[in-house]
Image: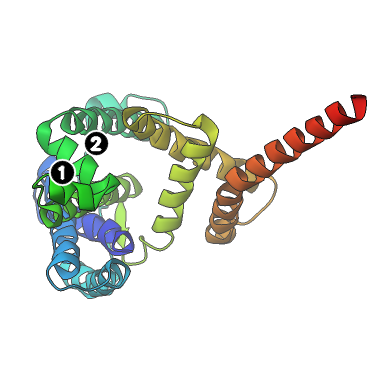
């Protein structure tokens, strides 16, 4: 649940920093750091404060609302007339909307590649084991609390980075930017899992990125059918619900097919 606070936190940090004369690249790095700090707080509340992870996330998300207002000094901040990472001459020379596509693809490639490399290290393997089986991880001498905190810091840092890039692309940061982000994230993950099936961990990282792109295409198709943009959160929830039901539906269909096939064989005999 922290994501709905750290996404606008990253946006607020980046936009406020840029509006105060800080370079866009440095502002984007600061957004990653503030997101990671929010993840650190969630991790400490969970591991050291023994607060359930869902409640810890909600507490940090709620706190972020006030922090974001403090950072921006209001409900929103504009970047009108300010340079962003999208203001480079190369990106401006691209066709309309291709600048955001180029930056988005570049960031996906860089982040995915770095995550894959990280997961190949000893620390990364310890991180994976902690996620798969904390009890076994502790039996190997792995500090699962530290791994949990690191995971929350890394994930929320990346979410803050995403918020910074989106806000620079939009030209503003708003206090309500994080609403529905968790639904979008879950939909992207589930679509990637459903479409591409059983994958290795590295392949799954790529599948999630592709799932987010497919999710946007699905939304675009739905909007083309005449739905209002005000219905986006409702549509996102419906799409996510359908995606969550697909694995069970496919299993049921396969089971019914096997049963029917068995019945046909028995009748033939």
| Side of 72 relative to 203 (left or right) | left
Q: Quadrant of the N terminus?
A: bottom left
Using the image, tell me which numbered label, if any, was put on residue 87.
2
Closest to the observer: 3 or 168? 3
Name the residue: 58% across, 55% down. 241
Determine the secondary structure under disc 2.
Answer: loop
Q: Position of residue 100 (x, y in %)?
A: 36, 35
Q: Position of residue 236 (x, y in %)?
A: 54, 54
The answer to whether 74 is drawn above or below residue 43 in the figure is below
Q: Are marks 2 and 1 in contact (CB under 8 Å)?
A: yes
Q: Quadrant of residue 188?
A: top left
Determine the secondary structure under disc 1.
Answer: helix
Name the residue: 91% across, 24% down. 268
Asked if residue 203 can be seen in this view, the reply is: yes
Name the residue: 31% across, 29% down. 202
The answer to whether 168 is drawn above or below residue 5 in the figure is above
- Please name the residue that numbered disc 1 is placed on: 24
Q: Position of residue 24 (x, y in %)?
A: 15, 43
């Amino acid at each position: 649940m922290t994501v709905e606070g750290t996404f606008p936190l990253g946006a607020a940090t980046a936009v406020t920093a840029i509006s105060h004369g800080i370079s866009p690249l440095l502002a984007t790095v600061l957004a990653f750091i503030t997101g990671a700090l929010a993840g650190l707080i969630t991790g400490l509340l969970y591991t050291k404060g023994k607060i359930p992870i869902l409640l810890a996330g909600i507490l940090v998300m709620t706190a972020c609302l006030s922090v974001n207002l403090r950072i921006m000094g209001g409900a929103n901040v504009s970047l009108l007339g300010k340079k962003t990472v999208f203001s480079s001459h190369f990106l401006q020379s691209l066709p309309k909307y291709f600048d955001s596509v180029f930056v988005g693809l570049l960031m996906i490639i860089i982040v995915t590649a770095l995550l894959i490399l990280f997961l190949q290290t000893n620390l990364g393997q310890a991180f994976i084991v902690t996620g798969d089986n904390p009890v076994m991880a502790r039996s190997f001498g792995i500090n699962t609390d530290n791994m949990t905190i690191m995971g929350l810091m890394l994930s929320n840092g990346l979410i803050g980075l995403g918020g910074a890039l989106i806000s620079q692309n939009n030209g503003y940061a708003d206090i309500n930017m994080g609403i529905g982000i968790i639904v979008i994230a879950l939909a992207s993950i589930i679509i990637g899992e459903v479409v591409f099936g059983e994958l290795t961990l590295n392949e799954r990282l790529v599948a999630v990125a592709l799932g987010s792109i497919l999710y946007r295409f699905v939304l675009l198709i739905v909007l083309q059918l005449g739905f209002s943009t005000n219905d986006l959160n409702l549509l996102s929830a419906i799409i996510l619900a359908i995606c969550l039901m697909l694995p069970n539906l496919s299993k049921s269909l396969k089971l019914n097919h096997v049963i029917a096939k068995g019945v046909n064989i028995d009748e033939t005999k």
